[in-house]
Amino acid sequence: MKAIKGFFFILPVAFTTSCMVGPHFRLPQAQVDRKWVQKQAVSEHPYGSAEKYWWRTFHDPVLNRLVQTAYARNVSLQIAGVRILEARAKLNQAVGNLFPQQQGAAGGINYYRIGNSSRAGPPFSSSPVADVVSRLLKDQNFQIGPNIATDRLLFSAAWELDFWGKFRHEIESAKAGWLASVAAYDDALVTLVGDVANAYVNLRTFESRLAILNQIIAEQEQSLKIAQVRYNAGQTSELDFLQAQTELSKTKAQAPELENGIAQSMNALAVLLGTTPAEIGHYVTSSGRIPTAPGRIAAGIPVDLLRRRPDIRLAGLQAAAQSPKIGVAIADMLPSFSLTGSLSTSGSNIASSSLNDIFMWQSKVVQAGGSFTMPILNYGRLINQVRIEDAAFQQAVLNYQNTVLKAQSEVENGLSAFSSGQRATGLLNEAAETAKHSADLALTRYEQGQNDYTVVLIAQQQQLVVENAAVSSQGSTILALISVYRGLGGGWEVREGGDVISSDVKAEMARRTNWGKMLEPGWHLPDVASKKEAKP
């Protein structure tokens, strides 16, 4: 008895002082520039709240509404939110492995019928109690009634001790996986906000190009009337009239392509907002202007990307989730120590006994013990599992370092496109003004008979090309700005103070499964959960 007590005293002490095999994770080193190469597009102001909610700097209420609606209704984002719940449940499951892994209760009742013969044979049902009764009747020549009943309650538990940190490593991996799912949600949110803004800018660009086309069409219709009047008056040949009519039809033929672009932009917004194409008109008003861009961007410094961009955090957390798996694989190569125990009570109606004895403490039977298991002759399977996990970890490290490099490249590309786009737009706007003036002048001189219609055609064609290019350049410059903000990792902050799963999705999940507190607002997010779990 003293040995058993000593055994149960030593094992918890050994458990609390046990070592954790495997590497300890450290965030990998990554190459980061000290400042942006495209510094001419970067302002001296630090990256702040205005850049976190960058779409608001366009001062476009329609765009603000679209972003908010997409955050609340986008289906892909809801899927990412539910994955956070899944990862949190896996973490809770891993924590449960620190406690006895097998626990159970069992009970049963048996009835036996034995004849009154002094040499009664074995009962029809075989069990330890039945065997005892059978031998008792055979050896002592007892005569008892025909009905015997026995019952039993059994409580058992088995606990594999976390001697090598196997289960604690699994918790580390699951926690990093949970945090990675939050980072994946934030990355999806950054992408979503950028996609909404892109689709909206494309929509406004197509609308602006269509407006310019309609304006040119109106001017060409006026030219056609002038050419017809002069032809009817015998001042020109029919050639001018036919050229004017041909050019007008050619210009009108460009409208369907722009209308198709408008329709596809609207359909893209419908998907992003989680609605149908027929309903998107409720969210997007009639024609509006292309958003205007600031002169320079508050981009901070490149090292800020390490903490701000969700995909970089995601890559680091994926490495953090993989590192403990090496320790788990190493622990599988070492001996495992387990405790087992059971508590049972039994009762019967034999002689003076009663079935109610099952509830008497005097009827208890206690069993306890310990064991260890040592893997041998595994033919390299276990060590190769360690190698597999180590190779996967190294891949995660390299992926993190590559993600950091790609992030800087994306921002630099956006800054370069934004800077060059601003210069090009300014020049094209100047060219558009002179092209319009040239077309008006050519038409006036034609009407006065000072030049032929070929000059008017060339001037109007040039006006359409230059004005269309100016509007397209303006839209491309805003798209470049959006890519910069996306590259800087702005946009995911819109979820702060909110939730990652809509109330409708929560209600549907609650009807199927008992989620406890996990469906409460923000409970599955690390910043909110840590505060709530800290309360007594």
Image (cartoon, helix red, strand yellow):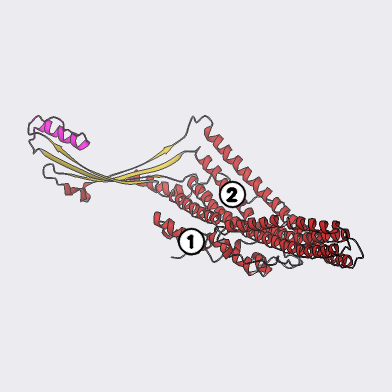
Residue 96 image offset from top left, x and y in percent? 43, 50
For the C terminus, which image quadrant?
Answer: bottom left
Start and end of the magenta stretch?
Answer: 115-142
Quick check: can you spot residue 159? Answer: yes
* 510 relative to 8, above or below: below
Query: Farthest residue toward the right?
Result: 450
Q: Nearer the viewer, residue 143 or 298?
A: 298
Q: Nearer the viewer, residue 28 or 303?
A: 303
* Residue of label 2: 318
In the rendered structure, which disc, 1 or 2, sits on the residue that comes first in sequence? 2
* Residue of label 1: 523
Please tell me whether residue 482 belongs to the stretch shown in magenta. Answer: no
Name the residue: 18% across, 36% down: 130
* 166 relative to 488, above or below: above
Decide if residue 354 is on the left or right side of residue 217. left
* 511 relative to 390, above or below: below
Which amino acid type is marked by label 1? Trp
Residue 463 image offset from top left, x and y in percent? 82, 62
Callout 1: SS = loop
